[in-house]
Image (cartoon, rainbow, N blue to C red):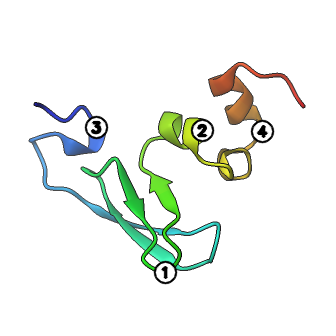
Amino acid sequence: MQCTCPGAANLRSPTLELRTCPQCGDEIEIFSDEMKAACERCGFVIYNDIISCVRWCRYAKECVGEDMYRKITGKEEE
């Protein structure tokens, strides 16, 4: 099974990104070939692609901004 994550291209090695957990504020390490990573402190899941983030994360609107959130979800302002 081939990974479809854009960061997992066989042309380069995975890169590391540090993200801040919106729940506890700890730093989370996520590699470009990972679809998601869990915060070691509180277990909150960070998604590596914006579509999954918007679909599954309760903080998505704050993270990606309201315009991008509406564009991806097709939802008008609530």
Residue 6 sits in quarter: top left
- Mark 2 to mark 3: distance in Å? 16 Å
Dot 3: few (<14), some (14–19), or many (≥20) neighbours within 10 Å? Answer: few
Q: Earlier in the sequence, mark 4 or mark 1?
A: 1
Left or right: residue 5 versus residue 63 is left
- Mark 4 to mark 3: distance in Å? 24 Å
Q: Nearer the viewer, residue 74 or 38?
A: 38
**Residue at 75 percent of width and 33 percent of height:** 67
The residue at the far front in this view is 43
The residue at the far top in this view is 74
- Mark 1 to mark 3: distance in Å? 26 Å
The residue wearing badge 3 is: 5
User: Which kind of residue does numbered mark 2 sit on?
Assistant: Val
Which numbered disc, 2 or 4, marks the residue closer to the eye? 2
Question: Is disc 1 placed on a helix, strand or loop?
Answer: loop
> Contact, CB < 8 Å: mark 4 with mark 3?
no
**Residue at 61 percent of width and 77 percent of height:** 25
The residue wearing badge 1 is: 41
Height in image: 16 above or below 49? below
The residue wearing badge 2 is: 54
Q: Earlier in the sequence, mark 4 or mark 3?
A: 3
The residue wearing badge 4 is: 66
Q: Quadrant of the N terminus?
A: top left
Which numbered disc, 2 or 1, marks the residue closer to the eye? 1
Height in image: 22 above or below 34? below
Left or right: residue 19 versus residue 12 is right
